[in-house]
Image (cartoon, rainbow, N blue to C red):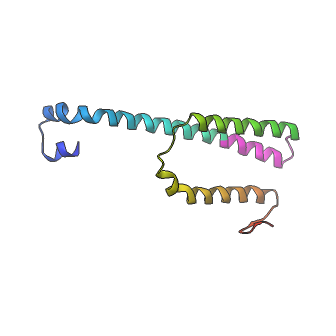
Amino acid sequence: MVAGIAVKLPLDEFFTTVVPPAAPIFIWSVREFLRQRDTADQLDGIRKEAMALWARAIAGQCQDDECRAKSREFQNAIFARRSTSPLIFPFVYPLLRDTLEDQMNEGAAARLAEIGIIVNSDGPG
């Protein structure tokens, strides 16, 4: 598309020679964007429900059996989302792994701190 604009193609030639070959990649990009956004929204909903359960458990408002069953439901929902979600490109994972692992560890440390377990770099203490 940029090449067509750069060589100043007339509008009719632009739409007959440049747009049709670019349409499939454009359509795929939009579809992929929407799928990724929907997946992220669904996982965010699961995360919010899990945090609400965590708050109830800390407050003692959740019986062991109920918390265990609800936790299993969250695990099942996460697994279902992962098994049906689009995969990321293989080269993306190594780029994001360290940052995402740090976020995960910070989140786990924050949850443990909420119940009085202090975590240092060597593990729980």
Q: Is residue 22 magenta?
A: no
Query: Residue 31, image x and y in percent?
Result: 42, 33
Rendered view: 63 above or below 113: above
Residue shown at 51%/56% (left/top)? 94
Residue 63 appears in the rendering: no
Q: Is residue 119 left or right of residue 3?
A: right
Residue 9 appears in the rendering: yes
Q: Count the marks: how many?
A: 0
Q: Is residue 52 magenta?
A: yes
Residue shown at 61%/42% (left/top)? 44
Query: Residue 72, image x and y in percent?
Result: 76, 37
Q: Is residue 123 left or right of residue 22?
A: right
Residue 49 placement: quadrant:
top right
Residue 75 placement: quadrant:
top right
Residue 62 placement: quadrant:
top right
Extreme residue in the front direction: 90
Report the quarter where the C terminus lies: bottom right
Span shown in magenta: 47-62
Which secondary structure type mostly characterizes the magenta part of the structure?
Answer: helix
